Amino acid sequence: MVSGSGSLTPGEERKNLVELFQEGLRKGARAKAIADLIGLCSRTLRRWGIAIDAQGFSQDGRKGSIRMVPHRFSEEERQQVLATINDPEYADLTPAQIVARLAEQKVFIGSESTIYRIMRQEGLLNHRGRSRPPRPPQEPPVLEATGIKQVLAWDITLLPGPVKGQFYYLYMAMDVWSRRIIGAEVHECETGELAKNFFDRICRDEGITRQDATVLHADNGAPMRSYTLAAKMNELGVSLSFSRPRVSNDNAFAESVFRTMKYHQSYPSRRFRDLPSVRAWVESFVDWYNNEHRHSGIKYVTPNQRHYGEADEICRIRQETYEKARQKNPRRWTRATRDWSQPQVVRVNHPRPQQHEGKKAQEPRPQGDELDPPARGGASSSPARGPAAQTSAQSFRH
C-alpha cells in the first residue's frame, strides 16, 4: 500500500494508514498481519499513532521531508504584522517597543522574535528612528618607518602647577624610528596656534622637507585636529594621521615617553614651583632621555645613538662578545645567542594577522617604551640602583 523502503510518507497519508491499522486492531486482527498488508512495521504504525494522539499530526523527521508547522503564521497574520510595523505610530520603534505598547492595549500580533524574523524576511530590518545607526569598527592606523624623519608621534600631557587645579601643558614630539625626542615645549594652555609654531620650529631644526614624506601621528585632541595646524602641515608637506577615538594604544610611542618621564626619580612628588622651573626640568629630562636612557625597544641603546647611526656598531660588538663567550664554553648554550641586531622596521600598529593554512598568526610585540613596567623609583625596565642611578637622577634635579 505504501512505496518502497526509505520513501517519505506525507502526513495525511500517515493519518489514513494509522486509522486503518487501529480499525483492524479493533476488529481483532493481529498487528503484524495488518502491518504486513500495509507494508510497514507495526512499531512504525504505533509510533505514528502516538504522535497523532498527542499533537494531532505526525510528520516525517528525515531531511527533505514535507513538514507541517502548526504554529506558523498564516498570510493574514503576517500581513497584520507588516501593517503594524509600517504604521506611522510604530514606524520609528523597535519590535521590543512595539510589543510592549500593543500589550498595554491588550493586543498581541506576535512575539518580538517573530516580528524580527518577518522584518528580516521582508528586508525591513533597518535602523529605525533618527539616531545614527551603529557603524562598523574603525580600522586602526597602520604606519611604518624604516628610517628617521618618516613617522613622528606627538602628544600633550599635563604637568602639575603650584596650585591645585593649575596645570602646565607639555608639547612633546618624537621620531618613532629612533625614539628620539625631537621637540618639547611647556606652555600655560593648549591651542592650535601653539602647536603650529611648535612644529614649524621642529621641521626647521630637523630639516624636514616635502621630499621626506613625513607622517605626523597624534590622538584626537583639539590642538591635533585644529585647522591651524593642518594648514601648516600641508604647507610643510607633512601628512597627518590620527588614532581611533578613545584608543590610547594607537599612540603608544608618545604615551610611553610620558610614562617614563612621570616615573623618573627626579619627577616632583607634588608640584612644580613655576613655569621657568618646569621648563628647565623638561629640558634636562629630554637631554637625559636622548643621551643616557637605554631604550628596551631599540636593544638598549640610547635614542641619539640610533638616530645618528651609532647603534649598529654597538650591537655588532655585543653580538661578537656573545659569540666568543659561546665558543669558549659551548655547553652552556643550548640555543642560539641573544639577537642584538637593531629592528629595521618600526610600526605604529601592526597589520591585522592573516590566517594561513589553519595556523594562527602570532601577536606582534608590544610597542611601548618598556616591556616591563618600572617601579616608582626608575624609568627603565630594570630599575637602576646604587650611586650611578642617583648621580644620573641628580644631574637634572631642580
Image (cartoon, rainbow, N blue to C red):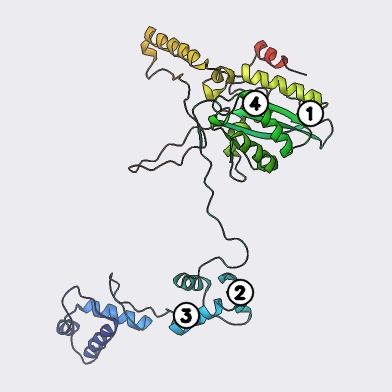
Q: Which residue is mark 3?
A: 78
Disc number placed over residue 220 in the picture, else none: none
Q: Earlier in the sequence, mark 2 or mark 3?
A: 3
Query: Residue type at mark 1?
Result: Arg
Image marks 2 and 3: residues in contact by CB distance under 8 Å: no
Tell me the mark number nearer the camera, choosing from 4 and 3: 4
Q: Nearer the viewer, residue 361 or 62?
A: 361
Going by the image, does 323 lie left or right of 210?
left
What residue did someone put label 1 on?
270
Q: Residue at x 31, y 77 (%)?
A: 59
Q: Earlier in the sequence, mark 4 or mark 2?
A: 2
Residue behind mark 4: 204
Q: Quadrant of residue 203?
A: top right
Q: Are marks 4 and 3 in contact (CB under 8 Å)?
A: no
Q: Residues within 10 Å of mark 1 (few under 14, many from 20)?
A: few
SS at circle 4: helix
Give the distance between the C-alpha atoms of the residues marked 2 and 3, in whole angstroms. Answer: 19 Å
First along the sequence among labels 1 and 4: 4
Can you say which quadrant of the picture contains the C terminus? top right
Q: CA distance from mark 1 to mark 4?
A: 36 Å
* C-alpha span from label 1 to label 2: 56 Å
Q: Give the image quarter of residue 219.
A: top right
The percent position of residue 165, horizontal first and vertical second, equals: 81, 37
The amino acid on which the numbered mark 2 sits, given as a three-letter code, is Ala
**Label pair 1/3, CB-CB below 8 angstroms:** no
Q: Closer to the camera: disc 1 or disc 4?
A: 4
